């Protein structure tokens, strides 16, 4: 019978059967695994490795490999240089132990290289953010934050999925805010290919909502109503009826005219404003933040009160639609709100969307309000500071004095203006 001999040492060809007999047995798996760990860590295959409490079979396997007794003691120690020499000399692995380990266990990627490759993959995954900020510079800070806090990475989990997720979010953000407002499902179908792409709870909706909030300056929050208003601030409507705005003495439709004659408040829905927008506007419209002001104006002044609109907190899609329409038809808008960080932030959101003039809402007005309202004294400020682009001195004054003056405490003064 003719015998088949393995390759000569140094030829570089692995002799698989011989390598399996020498090093590929279960009792030497620990030795191969230790060598692989060193390769992954980028360490040389030199020096010794040890196994505590080896079995008799493991000792015997090392003795067969090295052709000598491995010694006694409670641990089993093997010099990697000796294993390398045996593999080269035997022809099982002419290029040594490192090649043998890969032949037995698969390719080895050093940890440093793996980290570089992983980092490159995540850079590639986040590339849509670079394209977005090039076309929408105001989202540069948001894009940087997404990279820094790993939002997209957590949502996507792997680079391929994350890139797809970011590509969708950036496609939506590139065309936001919409004006006039449109249905959220219709927008998702048109821009993202599915009416359900931005449904609550989906990773794409979470990421896009985060960008929309950054784009419009809408304050942080949580809950279904907050999400609905964030979408609405970007012109995306989850429905046409839940978004409303409170008014007093506006005219332009039979229903508004009738309520204005009675001096009674009237609630306009977004559905009404988008399907039958007002085509006339008074010369001036006054805007307040809190419904207490509008209710008091209706009680005190009735039909004699000039047109008044109440935001009831953050400007809803209905409020923005109404005020934009009034402005476009020539009305001058005058705004007043709470003197605190939350109130200033609401005013800032409105200021970015609709031009308005301060109605007793300047630094001088704030200082005067603090001086007037001493009993009981104003409460301390809470929340995160914000800017006041219509008058930077106002934010500086609020930070300096450090107290809040609610709109309700200025009620008599505001009613005197309206009268």
Image: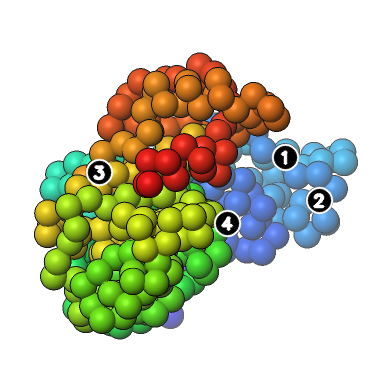
User: Mark 3 to mark 4: distance in Å?
Assistant: 81 Å
Q: Nearer the viewer, mark 2 or mark 3?
A: 3
User: Mark 1 to mark 2: distance in Å?
Assistant: 9 Å
Which residue in the protein does label 2 denote? 54
| Rendered location of residue 288, percent (x, y) | 41, 49
Quick one: label 3 or label 4, which is nearer the N terminus?
A: 4
The mark found on residue 23 in the picture is: 4
Q: Residue at x 57, y 38 (%)?
A: 409
The colouring scheme, among rainbow, by chain, secondary structure or one colour, is rainbow
User: Mark 4 to mark 2: distance in Å?
Assistant: 16 Å
Is residue 23 left or right of 417 when viewed as pictured? right
Q: Residue at x 49, y 71 (%)?
A: 201
| Rendered location of residue 305, percent (x, y) | 36, 56
User: Mark 1 to mark 4: distance in Å?
Assistant: 16 Å
As drawn, 377 above or below 249? above
Q: Nearer the viewer, mark 1 or mark 3?
A: 3
The N terminus lies in quadrant: bottom left
Which residue in the protein does label 3 denote? 356
Which residue in the protein does label 1 denote? 50
| Rendered location of residue 255, percent (x, y) | 31, 80
Decide if residue 252 is in sight here.
yes
Classed neighbour count for the residue bearing mark 4: other residues with Cα under 10 Å, few (<14), some (14–19), many (≥20): many
Quick one: label 1 or label 3, which is nearer the N terminus?
A: 1
């Amino acid at each position: 019978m003719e015998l088949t001999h393995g390759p000569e040492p140094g030829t570089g060809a692995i002799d698989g059967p011989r390598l399996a007999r020498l090093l590929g047995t279960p009792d030497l798996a620990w030795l191969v695994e230790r060598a692989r760990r060193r390769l992954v860590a980028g360490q040389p295959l030199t020096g010794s490795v040890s196994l505590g409490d080896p079995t008799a079979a493991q000792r015997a396997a090392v003795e067969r490999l090295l052709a000598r007794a491995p010694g006694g003691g409670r641990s089993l120690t093997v010099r990697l240089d000796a294993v390398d020499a045996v593999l080269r000399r035997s022809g099982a692995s002419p290029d040594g132990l490192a090649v043998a380990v890969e032949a037995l266990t698969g390719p080895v990627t050093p940890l440093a290289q793996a980290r570089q490759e992983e980092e490159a993959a995540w850079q590639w995954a986040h590339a849509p953010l670079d394209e977005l900020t090039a076309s929408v510079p105001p989202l540069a800070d948001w894009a940087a934050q997404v990279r820094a806090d790993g939002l997209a990475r957590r949502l996507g989990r792997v680079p391929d999925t994350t890139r797809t997720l970011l590509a969708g979010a950036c496609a939506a953000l590139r065309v936001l805010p919409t004006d006039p407002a449109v249905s959220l499902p219709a927008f998702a179908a048109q821009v993202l290919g599915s009416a359900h792409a931005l449904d609550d709870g989906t990773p794409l909706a979470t990421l896009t909502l985060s960008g929309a909030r950054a784009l419009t300056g809408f304050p942080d929050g949580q809950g279904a109503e907050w999400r609905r208003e964030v979408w609405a601030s970007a012109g995306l409507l989850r429905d046409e009826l839940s978004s409303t705005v409170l008014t007093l003495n506006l005219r332009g439709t039979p229903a508004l005219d009738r309520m204005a004659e009675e001096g009674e408040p009237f609630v306009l829905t977004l559905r009404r404003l988008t399907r039958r927008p007002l085509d006339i506007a008074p010369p001036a419209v006054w805007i307040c933040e809190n419904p207490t002001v509008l209710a008091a104006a209706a009680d005190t002044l009735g039909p004699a009160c000039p047109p008044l609109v109440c935001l009831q907190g953050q400007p809803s899609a209905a409020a923005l639609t109404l005020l934009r329409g009034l402005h476009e038809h020539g009305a001058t808008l005058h705004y007043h709100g709470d003197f605190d960080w939350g109130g200033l932030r609401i005013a800032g959101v409105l200021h970015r969307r609709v031009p308005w003039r301060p109605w007793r809402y300047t630094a001088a007005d704030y200082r005067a309000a603090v001086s007037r309202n001493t009993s009981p004294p104003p409460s301390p400020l809470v929340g995160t500071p914000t800017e006041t682009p219509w008058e930077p001195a106002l934010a500086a004054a609020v930070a300096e004095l450090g107290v809040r003056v609610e709109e309700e405490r200025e009620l008599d003064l505001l009613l005197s203006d309206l009268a």
